[in-house]
Amino acid sequence: MPTSPPPSGVRRSLLDDVHDRLAAHLADPDLVPGAPLRIDHLARQWGVSQTPVREALARAEASGLVRREAHRGYRVAERLPAAEFERLMEMRLLVEPWCAARACERADDDDRAALRAAHEAMSAAPTGRDFRAYLRADIAFHEAVAAAAGNRFVAAALAQADAHAHRFRRFGAGVDDAEEALAEHAAVLDAVLARDPDRAEAAMRAHLLGVTRRSLAGA
């Protein structure tokens, strides 16, 4: 069973960090479907034991990001087709604007600090070939909004959606929209910090619609 992300106010675990690293790794357009994912190699690369890598791969398998083959281990799964990407973004549009509005009402100081930190990390990260830190920060921002909403069931449902979206965008569409995405995230952050649920909901919806439009245009 996939491990749920921590509820609001709970420190992120090593597994959460390793899973975000794996999600960013899977968005590498050079990592073609069927490519092997060796647990020992990833553990050495990320400076962790094999246990959190194995658990992160199991979580990713449950969401369809990777597949496991008998006697061959884990391999990169096929990316979502365009129609499935649209369905994924429809789900996010139903849920994430709600999360942003609830975050205005429920976020505590730790939640707001996590949002600021993710946005600052995303702003500072490179976006060319060495884009993994940027993707980790992007994923962390959306996870922080979901966590701040204070509903662990919603946060668990969204845990893999951003990773699938990034993989579609990097592997298939090749979208590089960091400037637009950062501005859209800033609008969400400002609204949450101002505790303005209507503005936060609208800002998150505008961001997700922008991501959808830019991604499908490049597909």
Image (cartoon, rainbow, N blue to C red):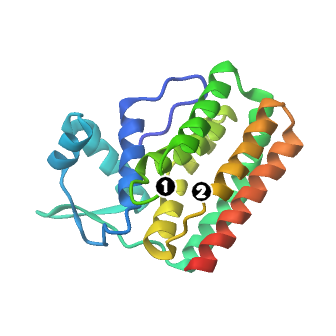
Quadrant of the image containing the C terminus: bottom right
- Which amino acid does the dot numbered 1 rest on? Thr
- Which amino acid does the dot numbered 2 rest on? Ala
| Mark 2 / mark 1, whichever is N-terminal | 1
Q: Quadrant of residue 191?
A: top right
Mark 2 in CB contact with mark 1 (< 8 angstroms):
yes
Q: Is residue 136 left or right of residue 57?
A: right
Helix, strand or loop at label 2? It is helix
**Residue bearing mark 2:** 178
**Residue bearing mark 1:** 127
Residue 195 in the image: above or below residue 9: below
Most foreground residue, 68 or 189: 189
Give the percent coordinates (x, y) of residue 44.
18, 41
Most foreground residue, 42 or 88: 42
Residue 75 in the image: above or below residue 156: below
Mark 2 to mark 1 CA distance (whole Å): 7 Å
Helix, strand or loop at label 1? It is loop
Q: Is residue 188 left or right of residue 121?
A: right
Q: Quadrant of residue 117?
A: top right
